[in-house]
Image: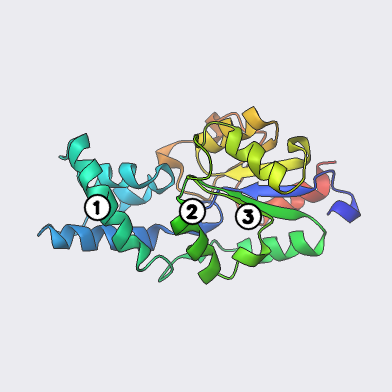
Amino acid sequence: MNGNGSRYKAVLFDLDGTLVDSAPDLIAAMDRLRAELGEPPCVADAVRRVVSRGGRAMLRAAFPEADEARIEILLPRFLEIYSQHLAAATRPYDGVTELLAALEAGGLRWGIVTNKAGWLARPLLERLGLAGRCAALVAGDCLPVRKPDPAPVRHACALAGLDPGDCLFVGDDRRDIEAGHGAGTVTVAAAWGYLDGEDPADWGADHVLARPADLLGLLGTDR
């Protein structure tokens, strides 16, 4: 790591679909919302694939007949339901726990840049035991803009006291790669994430990795 040869000083991650698999709790919240409205369960796969695109995209997938006005009406209730059970089944992806421990042991900082609102992201990280270990958390309501704008990534680097060129930014959505490139970080596409049906090789990332554990090889060999 940093003391053992890596040229990087920190790794920034997207949250949903990159560090954690939150789809089970989001789908469950969507099913509770649909039940309240007298509707059957949603098409889970349709919702899962767009988790990284946020609440509105998930609602459009679960309510394909709804216009944008109805989506806006449904969004607050969906998020309220989700907030009550946001860590029931959400877990870090396989290999993430070991990855974060290895980063810390090697002297690298890590942080999170997410479009998820802070009032949801912070309690989720607390319940997963990650909040106190995170060098920077930039949530979707921290700044006037969100990814793919590079400002949140730059802000995370500033909070961690780092130059973007010393950081990797890892994400499972094209917007993550665009934000990382714009901020000046090295970008990594997380092919284990939700991907919204896209091929991450098409996003122009500096690296595409199949598993969280592969990041350690990149950090150890990309000098």
Q: Nearer the viewer, mark 2 or mark 3?
A: 2
Q: Which residue is mark 3?
A: 212
Q: Is the residue 22 above or below the residue 127 in the image?
A: above
* Separation of marks 2 and 3 at Cα, in angstroms: 24 Å
Disc 3 crowd rating (10 Å Cα; few below 14, some 14-19, many 20+) is: many
- Please state if 62 lies on the left or on the right of 202 as rendered: left
Q: Which residue is mark 2?
A: 118
Answer yes or no: do the residues labelled 2 and 1 have beta carbons within 8 Å? no
Disc 1 crowd rating (10 Å Cα; few below 14, some 14-19, many 20+) is: some
* Separation of marks 1 and 3 at Cα, in angstroms: 28 Å
**Residue 89 occupies quadrant:** bottom left
Q: Which mark is residue 68?
A: none
Residue 82 pos. (x, y %) = 34, 61
Residue 111 pos. (x, y %) = 65, 52
* Separation of marks 2 and 1 at Cα, in angstroms: 27 Å
Q: Residue at x 54, y 31 (%)?
A: 149
Q: Is the residue 203 above or below the residue 23 in the image?
A: above
The quadrant of the picture occupied by the C terminus is top right
Residue 151 pos. (x, y %) = 60, 34
Q: Which residue is mark 1?
A: 43
Element under label 1?
Answer: loop
Q: Amino acid at mark 2?
A: Gly
Q: Amino acid at mark 3?
A: Pro
**Residue 39 occupies quadrant:** bottom left
Residue 38 pos. (x, y %) = 9, 60
Q: Amino acid at mark 1?
A: Val
Answer yes or no: do the residues labelled 1 and 3 have beta carbons within 8 Å? no
First along the sequence among labels 2 and 3: 2
Q: Residue at x 60, y 64 (%)?
A: 131
Disc 2 crowd rating (10 Å Cα; few below 14, some 14-19, many 20+) is: some
Q: Nearer the viewer, mark 2 or mark 1?
A: 2
**Residue 164 visible in rendering:** yes
